[in-house]
Image (tube, rainbow, N blue to C red):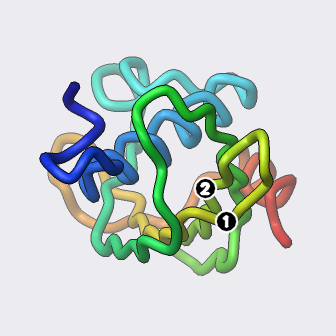
Amino acid sequence: MYDTDTAQIIFFGSQFRFINDTLEEALRKEGLDLHHLFRKSDYCFVVVHAEADYLAPLVAGDEIEVKMTVFKIGVCSFGFDFEIYKTDTQILSGKARTVHVVVDPKTRQKKPIPETLRKGLEKYQA
């Protein structure tokens, strides 16, 4: 299985897929479709930093819950903290952090966070 490694525990890279799925779902709830942002909008955002800590084993079949909060909203950038819990025990299995920068999709130059995105992000501030 892709999510586990040869030691039968969660593959470290899977944590980033889990947090990305959580982020995309939150964006959808705020009416922000990534396909639209990158192809039809006057802004998009890109990951400029990502880090993760593996804290406790997860094995194939474990159900997880990912909690997401915004730790920073700047002029052109924002950041998320994620916590990955094993659902049945609520053991914190992993933590991750990402930093994103808003850019013009054509020029890839930084630009200020649009107000609609800023308002959506503020809902997730810790």
Eyeballing the image, is 2 above or below 95? above
The crowd level at tag 1 (other Cα within 10 Å; few <14, some 14-19, many 20+) is some
Q: Residue furthest front?
A: 7
- Image vertical order of residue 36 relative to residue 115, above or below: above
- Measuring from the top left, give residue 8's x and y in whole percent: 27, 45
Residue 5 marker = none
Q: Quadrant of the N terminus?
A: top left
Q: Which residue is mark 1?
A: 92
Q: Which residue occupies the foreground of this view, 14 or 100?
A: 14
Residue in view at x 60 percent, y 80 percent: 74
The residue indicated by pointer 2 is 84
Amino acid, disc 2: Ile
Q: What element does badge 1 sit on?
A: strand
- Can residue 109 be seen here? yes
Q: Amino acid at mark 1?
A: Leu
Q: Position of residue 15 (x, y in %)?
A: 39, 52
The residue under the point 31% across, 30% down is 38
